[in-house]
Image (cartoon, rainbow, N blue to C red):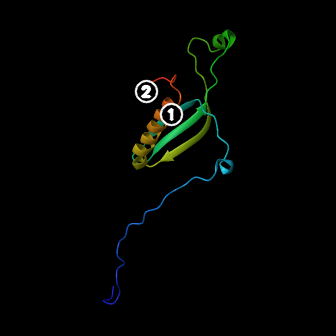
Amino acid sequence: MSGDESVPEARTVAFSVVMPPAAELPLAIYANWALANHSQNEVMLDFAQVALPSTEDELKALGDSPVIVAKPLVRIAIPPLMLDSLIEALQKRRALMEHDDPTAEAAT
């Protein structure tokens, strides 16, 4: 680097991230089962649909050691640094849901 080149000064830039209107979002996918796993570099969240037996015949068809195969829908990988803010956002959303619905179970 020659003496007449200058190094740009580091600066902080504030910005906001917003979601588009609901009409522009993709359709929601229903999942009634989730699994969290992790590696050193990412946290994986797997979402699936699990069809539980709804009749006595379906329950008997599972046999003595029942295994229900989930229908995988999506795997989302996030960086570990995002985990705390995701948990905080979910806890806040749950608190709002419980506030809106006094019959909802309290978080344990």
Seen from the viewer's position, the closer of residues 17 and 86 is 17
Residue depicted at x 62% and y 53%: 20
Seen from the viewer's position, the closer of residues 54 and 11 is 11
Residue depicted at x 49% and y 37%: 93
**Type of the residue with mark 2:** Ala
Q: Which residue is mark 2?
A: 107
Q: Is residue 51 left or right of residue 6?
A: right
Q: Quadrant of residue 70?
A: top right
Quarter that holds the C terminus: top left
Query: Crowding at label 2, few (<14), some or many (≥20) Cα neighbours within 10 Å?
Result: few
Q: Which residue is mark 1?
A: 35
Quarter that holds the N terminus: bottom left
Q: Is residue 2 left or right of residue 71?
A: left
Q: Position of residue 78 (x, y in %)?
A: 48, 47
Residue depicted at x 54% and y 37%: 46
Residue depicted at x 52% and y 31%: 100
Helix, strand or loop under label 1: strand
